[in-house]
Image (cartoon, helix red, strand yellow):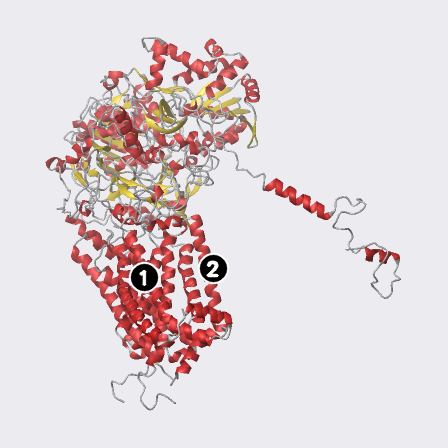
Amino acid sequence: MSVLKRSPLIEGNKTYKDITEDICKPIESLPGKGWFSYFVPSVFTLMLWISVVATLIGVGLGLLGLSHPVGWGTPIVTFVFWIGIGHAGTLISAILFLFRQKWRTGINRAAEAMTIFAVMVAGLFPLIHVGRPWFAFWLIPYPNQRGPLWVNFRSPLLWDVFAVSTYATVSLVFWYMGMIPDLATVRDRAKNKIRRLIYGMLSLGWRGTNRNWSHYESVYLILAGLSTPLVLSVHTIVSFDFAVATLPGWHTTIFPPYFVAGAIFSGFAMVVTLMCLVRAGFPQMKSYITVDHLEVMNKIIMTTGLMVGYAYASEFFIAWYSGVEYEKYAFVNRAFGDYWWSYWIMAICNVVIPQVFWFKKMRRNIYVMFVISIFVNIGMWFERFVIIVTSLHRDFLPANWGYYHFTWFDAGLLFGSFGMFFTLFLLFLRAIPMVAMSEVKPVLSVGRDASGGHHE
Amino acid sequence: MINNDSSKYWRELNPNLEPELAKTLEEEFQSSPLASGDGKDGVARRDFLKLMGASLALSTTSCIRRPVQKIVPYVNRPAGLIPGVSQYYSSSWSDGGSVYGLIVKTREGKPIKFEGNPAFAVNGGALSARAQAHLLSVYDPDRLKDPAKVSGGTSTKVTWDQLDEDVSKKLSQGGVYFLTSSIPSPSTRMLISDFSSAFGAKHVAWDPLGQDQISSGQKESYGSAIMPRYRFHKARMIVSVECDFLGTWISPVEFARDFSVGRAPNSTMSKFVAFESNLSMTGANADLRVRIKASQQVHVILGLAHEIAVKKGLSRYAGAPGLRERLAAYAKAHEKLGIEEALWSRIADDLWAHRGQSLIVAGGLSASPGVGLQIAANLLNSILENDGKTIDYSEAPYVGFQSSYEDIKGLIRDMQAGKVKTLMIHKLNPAYVLGSNSGFVEACKNVPTIIYTGSHFDETAKLATYLAPDNHDIEDWSDAEAQKGVYVIQQPTIRPLGNTRSFQMSLINWAYMEEKGPKRLLDAENWYDYFTKYWMNQQRALGRPGSFEDFWHNFLQTGVVDVSGAGRDKVAAARSFRVSALDKISVPKDSNSLELVLYSSVSLGDGSDSNIAWLQELPDPVTKLVWDSYLSVSPERAKQLGVKSNQVVSVKTATGEMKLPVWVQPGLHDDVVAVAVGQGRDMQGRVANGVGANAFKLVDWSNDSSPVSSGLEVNLTVTSEISELACTQGHHSMEGRQIVVEATLDHYLKDNNANIHRHKITSIWSAHEYKGYKWGMAVDLSSCIGCNACMTACQSENNIPVVGKKYVLQGREMHWIRIDRYYVGNESNPDTVFQPVMCQHCDHAPCETVCPVAATTHSPEGINEMTYNRCVGTRYCSNNCPYKVRRFNWFSYIKESSPISMTQKPRNMALNPEVTVRSRGVMEKCTFCVQRIHEAKNHAKNENRKLQDGEVKTACQQTCPTGALIFGDMNDPNTQVSKLFKEQRTYSLLEEWNAQPSVRYMTKVRNTEHLKGAPAHHATGKASHSEPAKAAPHSDTGSTEKGSSHEPAHGGH
């Protein structure tokens, strides 16, 4: 075995048939206790979330801890958090596809699903956070009878509407496109009519012909090309919400790359969290979602973690270097002011803890990476909290200074959103092949030596 | 179906059943669902159900109509009333003996705003926050609506006829007493004396805020009990001792206006030295403020008197017999006060240098001892030759005050002795404002009949026998003589909202029923008749020419009859001070114990209007707290006691005990704790009930010369309880930023640009073009005294909701204009600065760019407009506003169910129809009173001309007593605002941010030698930047600036 020999992408000497059987099994069998033990609490949390959101819309945003200087709080923090998570999927499937990273095949389907669901959850937050959600459609520039009333194209919030909706649409189409051959497989294996009908409709008449494949490949490539800039643009534009404002602590040119790095960081962490759970729940998936996969992602987490850490440091440098007193105060206040704890939670979770991944043993330890990936996401939620809340709570005129009083509704809004995310994700695991069969099969041979591979 | 035919189907093998059972079997169903054959069963079930169904359908579905809501057009429009056009009536409000001339703005018959009457010499066009808010008391939903009989603390509604019958019988039994607040209305006083002469009644007046001290002190010092007028505008050196003359003392609006005249930053700027224990709004405006113990007030004045008259041997009193001996005890007063000798001597020298142009004022609720302090102040004023010059005792002194401690003590004694058979209480709530050891409440048990004319079922109403609710001030006729020869009308501007009757009409009725009294009383058809006849005589007495018709018409129109005229500022000969009066001063004993000082707050005063939510949510000018009572403790004392803000302590004095949360207050003397009166109502109404504690209870009434409300010995017990206080301001130091620019007078006179750090600003954007008007506002920080009048005026004009304590704690108060108060210097005795901040109407408004739906836009006249209908509530604008002047509707504040809501009936009648009432989820902010601008513009357009400078006044500007806010057209170089903008002391807030605000500030100039804060901005600010305050927002009151630890003793002058 040469040193450059690649380790196999799929473990366990699988055949094509094995792959199909393994991957289709969760779709074709009834869920067991394990799945329900996740699903029931998730649905319960979702219900809780719906009631929290309904109360907020019915009674008023005053139920949250939002206040006079701190006009944005939990809803926007959590919006940016979920949008950030929504980055990994498209990055894995589009950018890694363009870079011909074959290891992506094992995780791209689930990661993309995660993206879609995260963006769905995220997209609701701006609606929840506005004072009059029933008029939120005014942010869409549509022909109307209100005379010259039109949206304000100078507002970053409007850019946000376009960026997020474009990203959501393209990601969804991309995900669905990639799924068609697999859906056709499920259709072909279906043993009852309804099943065949549903998957038949979803697979859009896929027959696996040469023409089908040829069209499919080119569309997939085009969509990958379209998605790639979007991966970078969404969070860039989300960061403009802050960077374009005049508030010290927001008004920073480093924000676009810093936000994108942070988004990849949190997105990969969420993929690791989910993949660890999937491996535990569906042991047969360990062959497709291997420790090698996870190790690669952990490397990316560590790298982006360092980038984020660099951004934290350079923000402080620029604040000092700029000589702007408000800017300086804003950053000193972040680290040592009333919200020092949130800053240090962020710094420890995002910069210190991922350093554990320098050690290969740790990188490959499922338990370690599971815990770290959760810490990373806690840290990333606090990063947005730090940026939004600590900058707002003490700005220019000290008389305005205030504090963000976290309420139960804030907690419900944050934790409840996980209910929606996990409900959707758990349903996904049971309805759609969680690993892209059609992409895994071509890489079956990678890393196998001539003798050991096929047993036929 | 059961078939009774003969051919039966068999059912069982054995059909021989018992007949009973056979019958049961046949009629398995006890009755048929169809109509029964014989009709015996009545209506069949199916028919019944059909009928029921049909009737249900008929009665519900077809009969629903929307409830009829009739709108009634003005078919017969009242003469002179145009719907949609405001009408203005002159009127007045007498707050005890203090009188405010009003212009009442009404719309479609509803008074919606109070403004000061510019023709009235006392308050002019200005009003205080309380006077502005008094409007809402007419619409108080808790007002008594009917006369009632009270027994055992519960009231039963009666008719006026029943009440009159009962009362008139009681009156003839004698022993009739009146207990009222000061009544400045000469016609009412005449009516009371007419009535009293007929029924042998006695009239006792009492004002709770210590107004009686002055006339008593005058009587002791000069022989006649008058209330002189203080001419602050003529004083170039003012020394106040525990006297909140800008906030609550006698006639604060007038004093504020006069005070500001002398405060223009030029070579004749007055110097103001304040000695006080608690940091009052007045003290916050001082050039030099010295902390003293409450028991040292007399020492300050007599110490200065000794310094001038005895030590330096100046003035005509220098050799006055007996003076030297009587002042000997005060030779070392400055040592006792902890003031450096050089400074002390300098103050004395300055006073002497400005003799005849100086003014010593002392007194109020926090004075100790009440009358003695007045005597001392009179002596010093006499020494300084101020009497007759800055103190007007002869031309236009106050005549509205009749309060007498002796009288009310006598009344209580008479009540205890059972001499009082019928007690009529009017415009006073004695059960609330008298100290718990006054014995009043117990003495009421000996009074068979108490008639109360109050507007609420309050503490006194509970003790009363009959409730004869009086009309509100703006529901009935009256008048007031504020100062000698200065009369003002009180016109009704709305029909009484309830079945109430004026106090005066009641007296006339009762006199008529008993057929007692002078002819003019018995002849009067009603109060209006009596009132106009009084003025017919008065016209002659005042020597006003012309027919009564003309005189009356003119009086109603202008609201004022002023015969004081040019004599107002005439110099009179000094009276001679009786040195022997000094023996009457009972100097408080020296004690090492903690002293409690009671004071009246700017928002609530004596607490009579505490049921007005505007006032409850109006931040105290100094503490910035709302909706509560609290014990102010100095930072040093708090450290010693180991208490922090919000911690509850038990406050115990000889007369009572109460639990209050602590507020750590810079500037308070370390041996003093202070609490405001006016809260602690439990029977006033839905707003005031349960808020805070009643500190009037702690006033000691055992003293003979005046009630003791200051320097009370107090014991504090710290509890573990926490009661959070709601502060509207988050942080109290400017952190070295250029926010309020201060300069000393000398520095400013040398360089008008003093201490303003200018920035070189370049912009890549082209500026807006303003072709017509361009509105702007100048804010003179030298003039602003922080009195909050603008906040209430704005609230009234713009329908601004109140949110309640719970939400103020979360920083959600809604005021469009706020007054930021910063402390400068060390926290034991800092300098205080005030800064009104409203929307700055930036030319490069950061809010406008970020709104995704263009709900906030720039008007062609430079106003940053807010379109509520378009707002979806992203709050991005607020986040991006460097001044944070935008306010968000977190909830629906217009819900009628909330007890503090402006839409709760009949409070909704006070809403300004020109201003949208905002719904939930939208942003709002100052509009520069755009509705006023448009009204004035329409007016000018009709006359085909341009607006003149001063024609449009914003609500805040209109009511400002000191003229600190100047609004106008920046495009016209001749307007006042344009001229001020060209002055060198004008700067923009956060100038370097280049938002280009249309509101600009003007340096605060202090007549002192050193500023406590180092010159602001880059020069010395660095130390504070690197070290953000660590403590909670409300406790880090001290400044972190370096080089700013000048104690007052080393500072000023």
Which residue occupies the foreground of this view, A164 or B496?
Answer: A164
Q: Earlier in the sequence, mark 1 or mark 2?
A: 2
Q: Are the numbered discs 1 and 2 placed on the same chain, yes or no? A: yes
Tag shown at residue B395: none
Give the side of residue B352 with respect to residue A144, left or right.
Answer: left
Where in the figure is residue B180, as x and y percent of width and height? Answer: 44, 24
User: In this orientation, does residue A381 appear?
Assistant: no
Residue farthest toward the left in the current orientation of the protein? B750
Q: Residues within 10 Å of mark 1 (few under 14, many from 20)?
A: many
Could you tell me which secondary element the residue under label 1 belongs to?
A: helix
In the image, is residue B4 above or below residue B1007?
below
- Three-letter code for the amino acid on which mark 1 is drawn: Tyr
In the image, is residue B7 above or below residue A93?
above
Which residue occupies the foreground of this view, B563 or B944?
Answer: B944
* Residue identified by numbered label 2: A47
Host chain of mark 2: A
Where in the figure is residue A207, as x and y percent of width and height? Answer: 39, 74
Where in the figure is residue B6, as x and y percent of width and height? Answer: 86, 56
Where in the figure is residue B652, as x and y percent of width and height? Answer: 42, 42
